Image: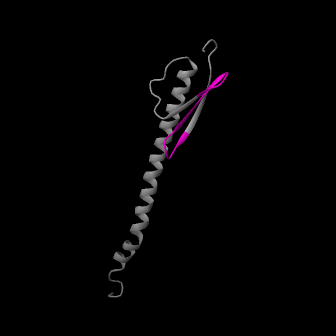
Amino acid sequence: MSRDRGSVTAELAVSLPALVLLLMVGVLAIAAATTKLGCVSMARDIALSVARGQTPSTMDGAAVRQLDDRVVVTVDRGIASCSATAATEPGVA
């Protein structure tokens, strides 16, 4: 019985860093997904506003290119970047 003494503590000491690493990876994945969703939403909203001839409410770090028949918006958020394209409505300059 004395040979098994402390084995649970040793196993916990070995497995705890792996559990912490998995938890950190999970939190970072959730943060990246949230940032990507916000980026996509912002790019879409700006592209639609510009395509309708309106002034977007926010342009926070967005690059807007107006082509002949469409608007392309690119947003860069460090760990996530995205772009959205919207067709320009007829009659909008």
Q: Is residue 11 left or right of residue 82?
A: left
14 relative to 91, above or below: below
Residue 68 x/y as whole percent: 67, 22
Q: Is residue 55 left or right of residue 8?
A: right
In the foreground, 68 or 86: 68
Residue 67 x/y as whole percent: 65, 25
Instruction: Tell me which residue sits at (47%, 42%) in the image.
Output: 35
Residue 16 belongs to magenta span: no
Instruction: Tell me which residue sits at (39%, 68%) in the image.
Output: 16
Q: Is residue 4 left or right of residue 48?
A: left
Quadrant housing the C terminus: top right
Magenta segment:
65-81
Instruction: Tell me which residue sits at (51%, 33%) in the image.
Output: 62
Q: Quadrant of residue 91?
A: top right
What is the residue that sits farthest to the bottom in this orientation? 2
In the foreground, 34 or 59: 59
Residue 70 belongs to magenta span: yes
Q: Is residue 16 left or right of residue 44?
A: left
